[in-house]
Amino acid sequence: MHTHDIELGVSDVLQHHISRHVVALKPVSQRKLDFEHKRPRILRECVAEATGVFFYVFPGIAAIASFTLNTTGALPVSFFSNILQVGFAFALGIAFAIITVAPVSGGHFNPAITICFAIWQGFPWKKVPHYILSQIFGSFMAGLVLMGCYWPEIQALRAADIAAHGTAVFNGGAASILCSFPNPNQTNQGYLFFQEFMVDAFLGFIIWAVLDPANPFVSPVSAPFTIGLAYAVMVWGFAVNTISTNLARDLGTRFVATIFFGREAFTASNGYSWISILINIPATICATAFYEFMIRDSLQQMGKGHAQHEEGEDGLMRHLTKTGTVQDYRNNRGIEQGYSTALTGKEGLANGNEKREMV
């Protein structure tokens, strides 16, 4: 265990107690090493993306199921009958997804984020289709498992919906447990477009700011919960109307809704599904473009050692000399090193704690 990645006070405690409280791992066999060596990297990444989306979607739609089933039942349970628990379920699901599998794939869990990484951060375009299909598959499996867990209750609700409304595909109906539908009075597609666009742009900007290695206010430890909380506040603010926020989350579960509730899952509400499925991509691209062009400070990233000039140190020095900012750059770099030393008790930023690509 490398205790240099943990705060010094915690490290001191662990060094005294770790040998007594942690079971030693058994030796790694050569067979296992050979298997892991032959295992395709892209397979691990795709499995991680699918698993992460499952961990994110499954608790979220399970909370929606308990919310919908209890608020429509004869004896509502107050704790399971409010939007607060739905927001927390999605927030913690996202945090768990990032914590468990983000080190393998980068933790995108959203086609829009994958595309933005390809546009701005050099993520290989050839991997983009694999990631997106894996994300949709993870959401699809979450929907199937949820239907298996709540099958009797959902079938009873479906029968009641059909008896009362002639369909189960509407906001608050059985199908809305799996995917989003607008309220019956929300017939203006422009209004629905604007709402989804702003919610997704907000989330995209927050994610990009959290993943900026030059941001001193977010550590790798807090990033999963910060991103999850951003999703939660959007759920609390707009889920009463309807939001999707993620192509994979909506499309995967909408396929499941189509299996059990028919093609109306795609055609209901004047074809609202195209808004919930597609709008998050241009919205997230716009938000990340705004961050890249107006907020990002690449010189600060290089000063902190998180990036380098494409022509190396010589290219950086030519730029600093041309702009007359050599001394400012050196002063800022010294301030950052001093600030880091004060926080961590050692020179520079903590090794190994650079933020990964996460949703």
Image (spheres, rainbow, N blue to C red):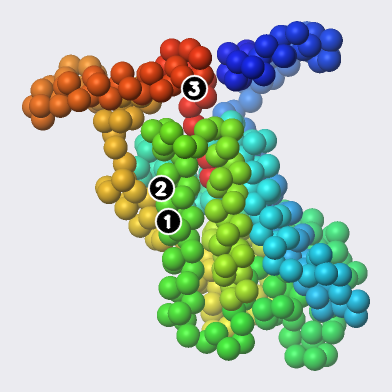
Which disc is residue 284 wearing? Answer: 1
Which disc is residue 59 wearing? Answer: none
Mark 2 or mark 3, which is nearer to you? 3
User: What amino acid is labelled 3 in the image?
Assistant: Leu
Q: Position of residue 193 (x, y in %)?
A: 45, 74
**Does residue 261 show up?**
no
Distance from disc 2 to disc 3, alpha carbons, whole Å, reads 32 Å
Q: Residue at x 49, y 64 (%)?
A: 199
**Does residue 191 show up?**
yes
Q: In front here: 294 or 277?
A: 294
- Precedes in sequence: disc 2 or disc 3: 2
- Precedes in sequence: disc 2 or disc 1: 2
Q: Is residue 329 above or below residue 275?
A: above
Answer whether labels 1 and 3 touch (C-beta < 8 Å).
no
Q: Residue at x 49, y 32 (%)?
A: 355
Q: Residues within 10 Å of mark 1 (few under 14, many from 20)?
A: many
Distance from disc 1 to disc 3, alpha carbons, whole Å, reads 33 Å
Q: Residues within 10 Å of mark 3 (few under 14, many from 20)?
A: some
Q: Which residue is mark 2?
A: 116
Q: Is residue 271 left or right of residue 292?
A: right
Q: Which residue is mark 3?
A: 343
Q: Position of residue 22 (x, y in %)?
A: 81, 15
